[in-house]
Image (spheres, rainbow, N blue to C red):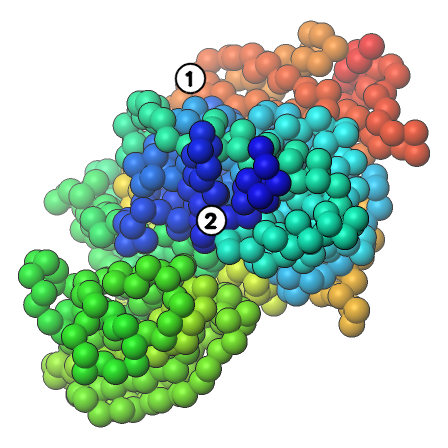
Amino acid sequence: MTRDDAIALTVGRDMWSTAQLPGIPSARMADGPMGIASGRVDERDVSVLTPCGMALGATFDPDLVRKVGAIVGGEAKRLGVDMVLAPNVNLVRTPLAGRAFELFGEDPLLAGTLGVAWIGGLQSRHVGAVAKHLVCNDSETMRDSYDAQIDEKALREVYLLPFEMAAKAGCAGLLAAYNRVNGSYCAEQAHVLTTVVRDDWGFEGFTVSDWFGSKSTAPAMIAGLDLEMPGPARFYGQKLSAAVDAGELDEARILTAADRVATAARAWAGGDAGNEPGDRATILADAAAASFVLLDNRDALLPMTPGRHKRIALIGPNAAAPCFQGGTFAKIALRPDAIGLVDALRARYGADTEIIFEPGTDPSPRLPAMPAAPAQDIGDGCTHGMTVSFFGGHDFSDTPLFQETRDTNSLTWFAGMPGMDAFDRPGGVRAAGRFAAPVDGDYRLHIGGTGSVTLRVDGEVVHSASRSIAPGDIMGVLKSGDSDHVVLPLEAERIYLIEAELRFEPARAQGLWYGVATPGDPETLLARAEAAARDADAVVLVLGETSDAGVESKDRDTTFLSPDQIALAKRVCAANARTAIIANVAHAIDTGFAADAAALMIVWYPGEEFGPALASVLAGDREPSGRLPVSFAADEADYPVFGAIPDADGGLPYAEGTKIGYRGFTARPAHAFGAGTGYGAFTVVDVQATGPFTIAVTVRNDAGRASAFVAQVYLAEDGALIGFAKQVIDAGETATLMVIVDSIALRRWTDDGWQMPGGPVPVAIGASSIDLPFRIDLPVA
């Protein structure tokens, strides 16, 4: 191909697509991994919402994760997407990581194994997987610039291992992270992109910058970055041609990069997705249940089989408003007919069991919801949501370019919106709805956006902020999601017209968000919950967080739940000891709030089938068969890495080396990596090495029902996980689980490169990283 052809292929055609040339199709990409979140044919389409990465990590089940990946692949093809920016195989280095929910956990072998399974599922539907974010993108504080200062042993054995497994499994591409590694930005990190990825791994796919993450022209291309995204070019394009003419860059390197992009486009663009791996709702409910980790279950409170209790109190803010996902650009619109927890429990338990619901406390998200009816009847039959009008300028008296109803409190558009194919000129958006105030009191109204914003109530301006945001700062504004708010007294049963307006200047993306917080008396909410608990035979208390608790570009500052939820747990458990706490979180938390509860179950962000899945688990139809993919410390000081705060120069030392997560604990954790009880009761009968890389673990299920056991094998020397297997065992039966040890987990990096152990390897076998009663030698030749 010509130099100009090659250059065209090394930069995106637009926000989400690669270039199209004769004989080379354009491939459309989208963000993931919980579904298809952007880059779709129609940004308004609702996509399937699967369990988050942490939930899938908790399944310890590659076959099930592969099915979930296949479902996402089917959605991609339905929405015109050819490649997905997923899976996220970074690691949970700190429990405060804002994006931890996307990750498979703190162990590199677990992340790599499940990442490969997800890739296999996605690519089985003729959709390419672009694994992200290469590499050490493990926290959000200064994630665009921090410098991960890491030794080669830790880099190779831990942080690169999941990417190596993904590359060797044939993923379509690898996405370079925003941060730096040992001084160089990942988009121009030659040691990683070329020495490791190309020379050592032999990877033949393409490499791509994270969006707006490229930093240079010749240095990035020479280092090994094949594709700059999005388009139009900032550093590539004709700047590459100028670099060749100046003698800074070999034209052959551009041709190689272009060929990789062209090969991927030919391989993945278009085509048929084939058939689903089974019934979608069933698979997603199975995956959710398989991710739930039962940590405590005193007196066998769970399952609460139907007919066992006449009255069950369902309490907690997350029972009414569950957290399904974190706050990232990969956020997905939940389908409107998803079954909530209250309805799911009432449907499953039927008329014989009374389900009493009390929130107990307000969920208090940073951006509250907007429960409104459309301001206009635009003929779409919608009765919930805001009427959204799009304008080709700042004059809202003009006829709108387009109108639609959106039942959301956050609107984001990349590279265009209805009526405007590109943000190359000023424009505006108005979201208007009728809000019925449920009670008298002071309401907090929020508004934020990527330009000047105005908030009106019944036609009167109650807040206005005039600002012009530089195009280069738009992504930061979107990431922060920060909003202004105003407090207004509203009257009960009165309907108010609320209008949120955005006037923007040209940029690559735009957003408008809004919400209204209803006043409530905290003590009244607590007292009602306490009374409901006291009058019930058993309690299901659903606590957790909101979608802005895990946020892209922002880390948390604690592992504790909010004080109001801790107080709610204390009051409810005191009122009724038969309380099962359901923690709707997706990272390690301090579990002291559950000390007086009979049961504690972690359910992560479980996807759109959360309601049916939890109802079936509580009723005993399904088992909560998950195991912890991260360690829960007894004290925040026990984590090997807690706050990952770069120094004044952006340096972030990885001083713990390979001692990530459970491998770096010096105190006994509250709940160990790999822990979880399920509904079974197991005895490990025998352990035998049956070959150089295989271990037979014979297990008896002593419970009165079928249950899943997860056999785990760790190196005795440094405690690293080297293999696992999960299998359902019938009640009273004995089964043998075959654990296959991947030799990649036995390698250790030295000054002379990779070294395999030269003789028998002592290993420990059991049910968690601290429950390892069996020791044998693995006869590695």
The residue sitting at 56% across, 55% down in the picture is: 233
Residue 312: x percent and y percent? 26, 51
The residue sitting at 48% across, 43% down in the picture is: 18
Q: Quarter holding the C terminus? A: top right
Q: Quarter holding the N terminus? A: top right
Residue 252: x percent and y percent? 71, 36
Give the numbered dot on residue 594.
none
The residue sitting at 21% across, 68% down in the picture is: 401
Residue 313: x percent and y percent? 28, 56
Give 261 or 368, whichever is nearer the viewer.
Answer: 261
Q: Is residue 25 left or right of residue 673?
A: left
Give the amino acid type for the residue marked by disc 1 in the picture. Asp
Circle 1: element type:
loop
**Which residue does the numbered mark 2 point to in the structure image?**
13
Mark pair 1, 2: CA separation? 55 Å
Q: Which of marks 1 and 2 is in front?
A: 2
Give the numbered dot on residue 730.
1
Give 211 or 59, whichever is nearer the viewer.
Answer: 211
Circle 2: element type:
loop
Vertical side of 207 occupied by 593: above or below = below
Give 207 or 716, whichever is nearer the viewer.
Answer: 207
Give 768 or 584, whichever is nearer the viewer.
Answer: 584
The residue sitting at 52% across, 12% down in the picture is: 735
Give the amino acid type for the residue marked by disc 2 in the picture. Arg
Q: Which of marks 1 and 2 is nearer the N terminus?
A: 2
